[in-house]
């Protein structure tokens, strides 16, 4: 009985929730999880190293490809840092356009997440519903930037495409569509009995733990911590817009820090983002969209820049920090990225302790981790070591939902 | 739709998807291709959970050093006839990561590739077209028997 069985099946799941290889090690007693350990690795592509061999404008495109879902936030944070070093003044209109893009990305990302969460508890029809709504948001992205996924809209000193007067009706129509469907989503996720049974009091992260482990983004806000880089260290045009921290007590009057609360926060943020885009459309001044339209000139200016700076952006998953040091050469001396998921991995440990195996997928997905699909789970059970594939986990999770529905 | 396709789609293609270190951009487009807007599933194209069930291997990403072995093994586990589709520039050429020290790709250094779907990220239409190309290959192999 004490033989070690290790299945090694190359790549795990098909679902888009857990990207980037990650392995949990669980100690379980029956169905209950006693202890959790997390192992990370594998999507290391040496991006920062490559960045030190390119100039700042080339890095924008490299940063875009750190993560396809936050393909706006990473170049944005990098740009903020570089602009601070070089002292580039960004035109007012560009600041508003940047907010619009950032919020649009948040809408796409949160709706994508909602679909994945539904998939994890076995509601594939809801996955399809949410992704259908998401297609509309992607259409809008494509209309504004020319691309669905990697948008290439950020430029040092501004943005690359303007929103003209004749584009406004289409944009407003899409926003109205999203607003209408938001109600549908709200009903499905917040009023459905089964969803509540699976997510309430499950995967709890207390406020103390959230603070202690430096959780970021919706994960920490769902635990009642008021932390949002858009409000704490306003960038772009955020200080001129009207919005507040989204915590679950806005809707329910209490904070539990469970998976349900994290759903509430993300859904409310979708609504907030739609609202922010509308505010931007109304208040946007006219003017230039780039500080320096000639790229050659801009490059010369950047080549002379010296100093170091940090760019902080509230990405859909939390604050994304880029540190850049320029030393008056073509290539930056150093570039360091801290993506929000780094911070949201440790909170998995308190969240998962004491839960059932079938709850692993939804709890893990509830922080919206941005990882590649090789998660395998090693279970240490009476000295046995089994590796559970995410497939099996997913099956267990679906079975639990079915049981609850009966 | 091209001539001959209805017959082609008589059989359903099962697809296995590997992410070998991609940025997720291509992966979300693959899921988008299966979701209602593009709905590849109506042709019987379906993602499966094991390479042993698959006719077609969809690979994204530039293959990091840690993933080489896994990509090879998944390929070996697939039954013949099989087709391999690389989705996205970074699997085809290395894309922006081309010079990195931790990459073993592009994927055709590791396993034989039948269809290259280009784009970063490719549109879902493009991915579906790639699958159809792969289907043609499988059909030809079948006919030769
Ligand atoms: S081809 Fe581009 S979008 Fe696709 S995984 Fe590679 S870097 Fe990401």
Image (cartoon, coloured by chain):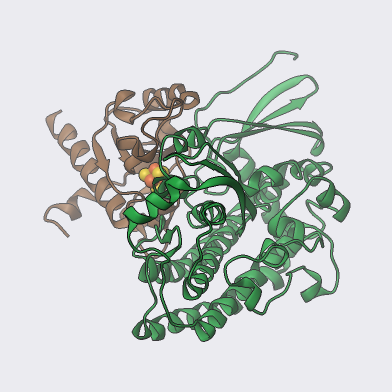
> In the image, is A116 to the left or to the right of A403?
left
Q: Position of residue A162 (x, y in %)?
A: 38, 73
Question: In which quadrant of the rendered view does residue A287 lie?
Answer: bottom left
| Figure quadrant of the C terminus of chain B | top left
Query: From what the image shows, is residue A44 above or below residue A16?
Result: above
Query: From what the image shows, is residue A389 above or below residue A277?
Result: above
Q: Position of residue A130 (x, y in %)?
A: 52, 66
Along the viewing direction, whichever of A331 and A274 lies nearer the viewer = A331
Q: Residue at x 30, y 38 (%)?
A: B85
Which lettered chain is shown in brown?
Answer: B
Along the viewing direction, whichever of A394 and A14 lies nearer the viewer = A14
Ligand 1: image quarter:
top left
Q: Residue at x 17, y 53 (%)?
A: B5
Which lettered chain is shown in green?
Answer: A
Q: Position of residue B46 (x, y in %)?
A: 39, 48
> In the image, is A225 to the left or to the right of A271?
right
Along the viewing direction, whichever of A326 and A141 lies nearer the viewer = A326
Q: Position of residue A54 (x, y in %)?
A: 40, 39
The answer to whether residue A240 shows anywhere in this view is yes
Query: From what the image shows, is residue A145 above or below residue B84?
Result: below
Along the viewing direction, whichever of A251 and B52 lies nearer the viewer = A251
């Amino acid at each position: 009985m004490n033989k070690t069985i290790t299945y090694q099946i190359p790549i795990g799941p098909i679902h888009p929730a857990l990207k980037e290889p990650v392995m949990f090690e669980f100690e379980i007693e029956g169905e209950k999880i006693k202890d959790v350990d997390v192992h990370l690795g594998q999507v290391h592509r040496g991006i920062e190293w490559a960045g030190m061999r390119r100039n700042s404008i080339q890095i924008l495109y490299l940063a875009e490809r750190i993560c396809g879902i936050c393909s706006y936030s990473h170049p944005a944070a990098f740009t903020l840092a570089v602009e601070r070093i070089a002292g580039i003044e960004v035109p007012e209109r560009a600041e508003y356009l940047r907010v619009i893009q950032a919020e649009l990305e948040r809408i796409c990302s949160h709706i994508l997440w909602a679909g994945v969460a539904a998939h994890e508890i076995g509601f594939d029809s809801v996955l399809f519903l949410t992704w259908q709504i998401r297609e509309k948001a992607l259409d809008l992205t494509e209309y504004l930037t020319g691309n669905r996924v990697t948008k290439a809209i950020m430029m040092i000193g501004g943005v690359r495409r303007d929103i003209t007067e004749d584009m406004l009706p289409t944009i407003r129509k899409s926003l109205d569509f999203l607003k209408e469907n938001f109600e549908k989503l709200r009903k499905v996720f917040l009023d459905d009995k089964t969803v509540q049974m699976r997510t309430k009091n499950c995967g709890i992260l207390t406020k103390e733990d959230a603070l202690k482990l430096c959780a970021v983004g919706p994960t920490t806000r769902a635990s009642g911590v008021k932390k949002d880089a858009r409000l704490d260290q306003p960038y772009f045009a955020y200080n001129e817009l009207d919005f507040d921290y989204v915590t679950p007590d806005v809707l329910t009057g209490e904070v539990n820090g469970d998976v349900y609360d994290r759903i509430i926060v993300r859904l409310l943020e979708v609504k907030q983002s739609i609202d922010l885009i509308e505010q931007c459309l109304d208040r946007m001044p006219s003017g230039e969209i780039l500080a320096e339209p000639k790229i050659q000139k801009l490059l010369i200016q950047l080549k002379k820049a010296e100093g170091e700076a940090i760019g902080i952006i509230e990405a859909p998953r939390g604050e994304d920090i880029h540190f850049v040091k320029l030393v008056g050469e073509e290539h930056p001396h150093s570039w360091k990225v801290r993506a929000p998921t780094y911070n949201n991995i440790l909170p998995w440990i308190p969240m998962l302790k004491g839960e059932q195996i079938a709850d692993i997928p939804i709890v893990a997905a509830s922080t919206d981790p941005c990882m590649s699909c090789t998660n395998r789970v090693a279970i240490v059970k009476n000295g046995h070591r089994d590796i559970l594939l995410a497939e099996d986990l997913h099956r267990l999770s679906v079975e639990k939902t079915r049981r609850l529905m009966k | 739709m091209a001539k001959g396709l209805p017959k082609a789609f008589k059989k359903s293609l099962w697809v296995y998807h590997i992410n070998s270190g991609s940025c997720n951009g291509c992966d979300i487009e693959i899921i988008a291709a299966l979701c209602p807007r593009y709905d590849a599933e109506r042709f019987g194209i379906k993602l499966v959970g094991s390479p042993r069930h698959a006719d077609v291997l969809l690979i994204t990403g530039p293959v990091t050093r840690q993933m080489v072995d896994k990509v090879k093994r998944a390929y070996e586990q697939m039954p013949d006839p099989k087709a391999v589709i690389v989705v996205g520039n970074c699997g085809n050429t290395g894309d922006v990561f081309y010079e990195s020290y931790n990459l073993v790709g592009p994927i055709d250094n590791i396993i034989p590739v039948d269809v290259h779907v280009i784009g970063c990220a490719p549109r879902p239409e493009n991915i579906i077209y790639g699958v159809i190309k792969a289907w043609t290959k499988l059909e030809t192999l079948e006919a030769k028997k």
